[in-house]
Image (tube, helix red, strand yellow):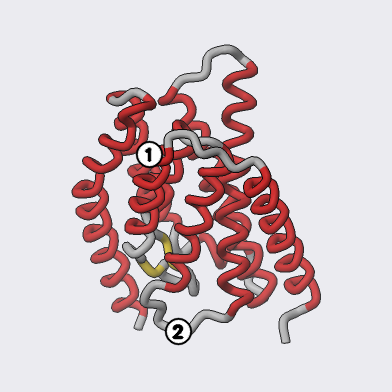
Amino acid sequence: MLPRNARLYITFVIATGSVILLLAARTWSAANLTQFFIFLGLAALASTFKIRIPGIESTITPNFVFLLLATNVCQFSQVVAISLVAALVQSLWRSSKSPRLVQVAFSAAAVVLSATAAYELTHLLLAGNGWESSIGTIILAGCIYFPLNSALVALVIGLVSGQSWRQICSPCDAWVFPYFMGGVAFAALVAAGYDHSSSWRGAVILIPAVTLAHVYFLNRSTRRLATKS
């Protein structure tokens, strides 16, 4: 049985994610569906590049690279759909253990919530100041998405396991942060080199770079896990 605080927190996050999904469904946009499906496919593909985070029962994937690019060029409802599919693939694809429904639901809700916050806050802050730009959108969205998603996941791990924030975060600080910042840099380069209508072309070109980065960090994670065992 999960601790009461953990149950309440998980329920809150899942409920919030469900509300966002309903809002996205009500405001669904069919604009530029070709670009939407390309980003959807790329995010789903990247979600299969899973790396286990040493020290905690969680994984990280480069799907956030394509989520950030989608934040720059897609509509709100499309970003929500892409984040949902990416999260489901990450949870269900070749999992070492069969995930429970509540785990899948929480993971999906956390990604949807993080992507929504990144999308809404980025466009609100940049458009409100009158200097919205593709590079600025990518960087600011990344600075919102990563800390929020990490905090949502770290908090549930702490509530379930009784570990402190330091115990959860310290084992992966040395390489998860560079992993994420490299992804943000890749996305920013694409945003700088391609306009909104052709951003998907740059995203496709990123696949080899994302694959190489995945292999590098996967080897680092594997060596670290082997050292601990």
Residue appearing at x 60%, y 58% in the figure = 110
Q: Residues within 10 Å of mark 1 (few under 14, many from 20)?
A: some
76 sits to left or right of 10: left
Q: Earlier in the sequence, mark 1 or mark 2?
A: 1
Residue under pointer 1? 35
Residue appearing at x 64%, y 26% in the figure = 124
**Image quadrant occupied by the C terminus:** bottom left
Estimate the x, y position of residue 159 in percent, counting from the top left: 69, 71
- Label placed on residue 167: none
Residue appearing at x 57%, y 62% in the figure = 108
Residues 80 and 5: in front is 80
- Could you say whether the residue bearing mark 2 is in a helix, strand or loop? loop
Residue under pointer 2? 97
Residue appearing at x 58%, y 12% in the figure = 130
Estimate the x, y position of residue 34 in percent, counting from the top left: 37, 40
Q: Quadrant of residue 153?
A: bottom right
